[in-house]
Amino acid sequence: MLPFAEDPTIRAARREAIVVGCVVATALIYSSTTSYLMGYGAKDRELHFVELGWGVAFPDWIFWGVIVPWGVCFVIGAIFAFGWMQDAELGEELEEEEEFSQPASDADRKGAE
Amino acid sequence: MNHLPSAGYGTLLVLFLLIAASIWLGTRAQRVVKKGDFLKGYFLGNRGLGAWALALTASVQSGGTFMGFPSLVYTHGWIVGLWIAGYMVVPITTFGIVGKRLAQLSRRTGAVTVPDLFRTRFNSPAVGLVALVFVLIFMSSMMIAQFKAGALIMKIAWPNSGVLALSEEAVSSQLDSKDFEKLRSQGVPGDVMEAAMPLMNQSFAHPNELKSALASRLSPDDARRYQAKFLKAAEPIDWLYLGGLLIFGLTVVGYTLIGGFLAAVWTDLFQSVLMLFGVVLLLVLAIPAAGGLIHATQVAVEQTGPGFAFGPGFSPDGRDFLPFGLAFSFFFVWVFVGFGSPASIVRVMASKSTAQIRKSIFLLGGYNMLIYIPLVLICVCGRAIIPDLPPGKTDEIIPRLTLSLTAGLPGGSLLAGLVLAAPFGAVMATVSGYLVVIASGVVRDIYQRFLRPHASAYATRRLTYIVMVSVGLLAFLLNIYPVAYLQTFVIFSGSGCAVTFVVPTLMAAYWPRATSQGAVAAMATGGLTLIAFYVVGIFLPDPMIGQIGSVRPAFLLGLEPIVWGLAASLTAGIGVSLLTPAPAPELVERMFGVEERPAAS
């Protein structure tokens, strides 16, 4: 428990980060497991393709293990960006610290002219 | 080997137009920089990045995207689709996990660089210094590797030079005593050297002749294992490569020097659009040329083996390219490389608003799908169209495929130039972005923080230019004998940044109890763990998994070092933070509390 009021932007960002973490974990488990179960071990398998037309085709394990989840993640990303993630005020830019004040030299002044 | 046409003048013309456009963008950027404070303008673009610039420049497209990655697809087959699959979640992780908070923190701290951000967030110079050391280690290695890619493209684009012949065919290959010394230092065993000794000082009109001679003198196993090293050692001096390296180096250092961060970002954006155009054009040309993907796969399987179409992938030396443990690991690699790279973090820090961050998630999601999946398809077709690129030359599959597919088209040379311009631009953009990060680290985090806090803008600017030129020169010199397997360096550098910066970034963003000691421990443990895995890998026998190459890490339990590095970094970061005194309440409130705003007058 913090002894002061936490910035609501941070609370929202933390919540969003947790949602993203869940999406990543799901995608990782689904994609690697599906690809492994459907596509590893060439000796025991026959090659099947999923055809999409115009000569485009994928081995079935790549289609279900990579292409489909990739499309789903794109849709989830769009929903996350436009339906879930909140806009927030990012705050004022901190003024340059005194220690870094940069006095203009002759060369600077010449450049400005 | 297929005899492919060399590039025409149109190809070179387009590349020079790209160079001119980059310099023009540099001068435009310079005008913006002049409007405000030099450091914030030159190194952060005055925090004005919009959605397109963020989306298409803050992730990890690089020379590797168009050179190393295609080389892997060409060599190992469809499995590389799974290898790169982590990119499906890169947009939401890069921007959704820490994007908003980083943009806010960087404003609260007034930070210009990543070490600057850590230093101020944890109120500790040590944190900033450790961050800087790792930035320099990992980003320099990546940047140096990228110079090779730029030079290679320039070389291939040289008109009517017979450059493909120059690199492999026209000039004789020869192994002299120095080459044998080099091979010995590269770990080629004594008995293999002895067997090959009669070939010393013989001239071979074509590398294939040397290959046959090696095959007749070495056992099949030794020939397969060491042939690439012998071929590499026998290569003559490549003047076109060196010329390309010089032009590339001068261009990229030149326009970055002129326009700083914005020049890097705008060129990156420009090349990203070119890259998309190039990929779509190549896809449209490659699929019919290969007779469709089913036919291309069948042809490739006939040439290689069933591993080309299944996991863990085909390898010429019989290794398992992507066993399950590595497939699992690579998801981590791409996810965390996306937001662990200081170049990416800086761009998020420079974002204009959260609305721009949200839009960029969507834009990058679409862009990644249109780049990486088609590149897999193109290179599977490439294996059928150009079936016999030798090991060590597979990096050239995209340039060669481009020249081959556009040769018969009207204006084919120009089209080839447009496609070749994409990877050239990608490499320039990567190098440019890294140059800015490295220079900003030296200028802001060493010179200004420790040596001359009151340095004038003129002195700061002059030092910035000196650092950029020196880094460019160093990269040029180190690339006279370039590294093989660019993608290995991309992964080393990306993983290094990830294991060093992911955990401290999360701690800085979301954990008020995180301490400066914890942040240092997280960075040092993560970074050193990864380096240790690579160093140990040198002394271990080849585990016959992962990529082919002389630089390989140790794969503990079959996992990529990034998994262990992240675990070590997380444990150290949390453990040390809890064991050290809590940070000052004022610091925590300044970073996590509601910001007080001056009342409106």
Image (spheres, rainbow, N blue to C red):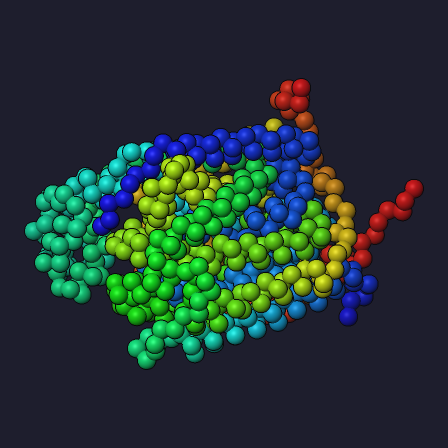
Does residue B478 appear left or right of residue B430 in this picture? left
Q: Residue at x 44, y 40 (%)?
A: B418
Q: Is residue B359 visible?
A: yes
Residue ranking furthest to the bottom: A44
Q: Residue at x 45, y 62 (%)?
A: A53
Q: Residue at x 71, y 40 (%)?
A: A96
Residue ranking furthest to the left: B198
State the image quarter where residue A75 is shown. Answer: bottom right
Q: Position of residue B244 (x, y in %)?
A: 36, 36
Quadrant containing the C terminus of chain B is top right
Above or below, B263 against B329 in this view is above
Q: Position of residue B180 (x, y in %)?
A: 17, 49
State the image quarter where residue B406 is shown. Answer: top left
Q: Position of residue B64 (x, y in %)?
A: 42, 51
Depth check, front residue: B391 or B554: B391
Depth check, front residue: B438 or B346: B346
Counting every numbered tag in the picture gives: 0
State the image quarter where residue B77 is shown. Answer: bottom left
Q: Is residue B329 visible?
A: no
Q: Position of residue B194 (x, y in %)?
A: 10, 56
Above or below, B547 against B153 in this view is below
Q: Residue at x 14, y 43 (%)?
A: B205
Above or below, B17 against A53 in this view is above
